[in-house]
Structures are given as structure tokens and as C-alpha cells.
Image (tube, helix red, strand yellow):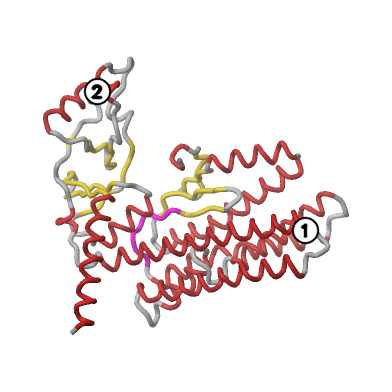
Amino acid sequence: MADMSPYIGKIDGINIQVHWISILFLLFTLLVGVYFFLLWFIILLCILLHELAHSITAKRNGVGIKKILLVLPLGGGSVIKDPSIKPDVEFRITLAGPLVSIILGIAFGILSIFIPGGMVKSMVQLLFLINVALGVLNLIPWFPLDGGRLLRSYLQKTHSFFDSTKISVDVSKVLTALFVAATVVFAVFFMGHYSFAYREFVIIIDIIMAMFIYSGAQGEMQATYAKEYSKGMRTVDLMNTSFILAKPTWNIRQIHEAMVKQHTHIILFMAGKEVRYIPSISYQSMRKPPEGAVTAMSISKEIPSVSLSTSVPDVIDVMRNAESPIVAVIKGSRISGYILAQHLESMLALKMQEAAINKAASRKQ
């Protein structure tokens, strides 16, 4: 769904994309009132500056950035191109965001001193609190927030990537449990002057946030397990070479004929330096091609690519960062094959099952 969201421009060569949920959220705030719309619009700009701090720091350290995706009211994220980052570089990149948020908070706090009382002053004071809270919250070692990545990159000085991630995720789980417990205690014993409905609302919101953080931590751990168990795999062994090498100018009938002849639905082609993939073609389109200049280029989308020498853990990172179910394998300037996420997951499941069996057998001995 993020691919359907509009790009609003570039800053320092970095694509800025606003998720459609953000647009709907801003429209909702506009219905509530102009004050709330302006408040959340400025919050969106503050989140953009937070993410720009990550992205620009990454670029200055030689790390490629694909885009910044802004998602209100959840926040945003910088999507990187590079599959792996050195721990010290990741630490600098991660720390830049919270520092910018705290600096913004201090700036709003100073500004509020010189503004006379009224709605503007209250808004600026609220922006002070929100930015400081955003900065401090992102320093807490909580995956998938910045603090969790800061802890992991710091731990990598003395631990492996796998162990550092596991420790960071375990810390995040403990903090999540404490957060939920503290929320319930605070709502029950310290919010007695509020209505029961309001206290329920606070608890529900905090539990939803805790579930989001917990699922993010679990996802990070699962990805780390995948990288750990894929170390012995080779890209060339996972690569599938059964695909249709199309041309950007092919029409639907030509694509259909190639599918029938080669007995595969995977259609790839090069467009300059980009590798493009045709996700699906409906049976109705094959029987009755739509009018107009419908070509392979017009119904395709760009997908990430790797070389034969790319390690499988890095292939997993490339797929994850690009949110793509398929990655092309390139040799020189030609497509050699592709790897499907589904196939990769099956191979990893077998690898993990084999490791579990060997571990159980060694215990019996």
C-alpha cells in the first residue's frame, strides 16, 4: 500500500513519501478543527526533520537511502538501500534522529517564552513537549525504536550481531511488560479523578503501542534468525533461472504468448539500469487486451537486484528493506535469475529444522 502513496519531493536527493494513512489522518484532523490540523501538520514536519537527520547522516557515511516514508500518527522511517551497515556507522545514523528531535523541542521551548498567551502559545508549548518526548522515547532501548538499534550497535563492540540483537530484543520485551504494568497501575491509582471511560482509553492506547513495539521486536528477531541460519547458503544455489526475459515494448499478447511457450509467470526485463518485474496479468486481460498502448513497461514495477557474490543474509536484508517478495540476480549487466521470498523462507525453515534435529541429537549423546 505504501507504493500507492504520493511522493512529495526530494531533499538532498532523498525521496520523501507521505503514506496515504497520513493524508487521511490529516483530513480527519481538519474536520475536527484548524488548530488540530495545524498541530499535526507541524508534527509531520518535525518527524520529517527527525528522519532527515537519519538519512543525511547515512548519506554522509556512505549509506544509500531509498526514501523517507512518513506515517501519521505512528511516525516515519528511512528506507535504506545498503544491506549491511557497520555498528559504529549505525550508531551515528540512529543517534542523529533523537538529537534533532530534542534540539527542536528546546527551540520550541525557547520560542514559547517570547509568545504571549493564547492558542499559539499553547501549540508551541505542546510542540516542545512532543519533540522532547519523541527524542527521549527514541533513546530508550526499545525495538523497533531508535534506542533498540543504539543498544544493539553498542553491544556489537563485544558481541556478535545475533547475540546483540537477542539481548536488545530481550531488553525490549522486559520494558514492554513494565510499560503495560505501569500504565495499568497509573490509570487505576493515579487517575481516579478522571472518568472510567477515559482511563480505559489511556490503557487501550498504551497497550496498542506496546503491541506495536513488541511485534516490531519480534520481527527484528525473526529477521536476525533468518540471517543467522542463511550463512551457509549460497545465492547461486537459491537462484531460479526459469523466467521470461521480456522487452519494455512488449504488449500483453506478446507477454501471454511467452508465458504459454515457456511455462512460467515470472517476467523480468531491464530498463536502463533498473530491473523491472510484471507482478500479474489477469486472464481477462489476456483474452481481451485493453485498448491503448499497454506495454510491459507500463504494467511493471522496479525490484531490487543483487549479484551472484552477494551473501544470502544480505539478500534477506535487500528484500526486507525494499519490501519486495522477489529479487533479481544480476551478472554484469544481464539478469541471470531471481530469488522469491517464499522459496527463501522454505529453505530457511528446512535449515532451522535440520539445526533443531542436530541439536536434539547432540543432547541425547
Q: Which residue is mark 2?
A: 251
* Residue that appears at 58% across and 57% down: 208
Residue 272 image-quadrant placement: top left
Q: Is residue 168 above or below residue 57?
A: below
Q: Is residue 157 above or below residue 74?
A: below
Residues at marks 2 and 1 touching, judged by CB atoms closer than 8 Å: no
Q: What SS does tag 2 mark?
A: loop
* Residue that appears at 75% across and 62% down: 109
Label 1 crowd bin: few (<14), some (14–19), many (20+), radius 10 Å: some
Residue 298 location (% of width, % of height): 33, 28
Query: Which amino acid, mark 1?
Result: Gln
Q: Which residues are magenta?
A: 79-85
Residue 315's disc is none
Residue most extreme to the front: 364
The mark tally for this picture is 2
**Which of these two is toward me, 226 or 316?**
226
* Residue that appears at 14% across and 34% down: 263
Give left or right: position of 77 versus 109: left
Q: Which residue is mark 1?
A: 125
Instruction: Answer whether residue 264 is magenta in the image.
Output: no
Q: CA distance from mark 2 to mark 1?
A: 58 Å
**Which of these two is toward me, 41 or 59?**
41
Give left or right: position of 87 versus 311: right
Query: Which amino acid, mark 2?
Result: Asn
* Residue that appears at 72% across and 69% down: 186
Please state, as top left, top right, bottom left or bottom right, where the N terminus lies in the image. top left
Q: What SS does tag 1 mark?
A: helix
Instruction: Answer whether residue 81 is magenta in the image.
Output: yes
